[in-house]
Image (tube, rainbow, N blue to C red):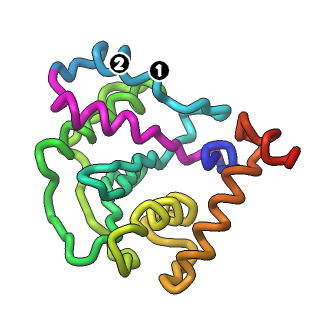
Amino acid sequence: MLQFDDESRTKLFLSPYIADMVIRSNAKYLTHDAIVARFDPYMYAFDGSYQHVTQVYLPVLFKNHWTLYVYDLHNKRIQLLDSRPGRKRSCMTGIQQKLAKVVLMLVADKKEMVAVDLNMYSFVMPDVPCQPNDNDCGVFIMKFMDNWSNGGLSKSIDVAKMKKYRLKLLGRLLLSSHNAHRHRFMAV
């Protein structure tokens, strides 16, 4: 839904299934052809030109916790947005490096450019609002995807309004014109 709502067509939203496959397979055999063949079928439809894409968003579920990776192609920066308090890192783990390699290779293929050198990218964990409990990480990630722009949040996130955010997200998802099952909810 976010892919279609982005009027600038500069953001590319990837399926969390891509991250799940990389994590489960330990991302062995990371050749260009193997990556494109395996992961391209899981790319969401994109009705813009990949040439204009400057940011790639990848939500990741790992050990029952959602995080968001934002690959800033213009500034050559990989940003990890994590709403869980006290989780700061200055470098990527091995699986994060493999995930970045897959994402950057897929994007390079779509943009029809030469392979991207991961070493040219910096890794940062920007300060973001923290979740007050163990079960709001998914809502935070949805808000981050909706409001992240140029390395920061374009709108603040009020932790006290989590229930309201959940209801608004539910309504947006159910009533979206991109929801193939929308007619079921409209008929009720």
Q: Is 57 one of the magenta-colored residues? A: no
At a point 35% along the width and 63% down the height, the residue shown is: 81
In this rendering, would 90 be left or right of 162? left
At a point 27% along the width and 41% down the height, the residue shown is: 100
Could you say where residue 154 lies in the image, as x and y percent from the top left? 56, 72
Would residue 110 be visible to someone looking at this image? yes
At a point 15% along the width and 24% down the height, the residue shown is: 28
Could you say where residue 17 lies in the image, as x and y percent from the top left? 39, 35
Residue 42 versus residue 185: which sits nearer the camera?
A: 185
Q: CA distance from mark 2 to mark 1?
A: 7 Å
In this rendering, would 6 be left or right of 17? right
Could you say where residue 135 lies in the image, as x and y percent from the top left? 38, 67
As drawn, the residue found furthest toward the bottom would be: 160
Q: Is 12 one of the magenta-colored residues? A: yes
Q: Which residues are magenta?
A: 9-28
In the image, is residue 172 above or below residue 10?
below
Mark 1 — residue? 41
Q: Are marks 2 and 1 in contact (CB under 8 Å)?
A: yes
Mark 2 — residue? 38
Q: Tell me the element at label 2.
A: helix
Q: Which quadrant of the rendered structure holds the N terminus? A: top right
* Residue 97 placement: quadrant: top left
In the image, is residue 3 above or below residue 51?
below
Kind of residue sitting beneath label 1: Pro
Residue 181 versus residue 23: which sits nearer the camera?
A: 181
Kind of residue sitting beneath label 2: Arg
Is disc 1 surrounded by few (<14), some (14 to 19) or many (20+) residues within 10 Å?
Answer: few
Would residue 117 be visible to someone looking at this image? no
In the image, is residue 179 above or below residue 137?
above
Could you say where residue 93 lies in the image, as x and y percent from the top left? 13, 50
At a point 46% along the width and 39% down the height, the residue shown is: 14
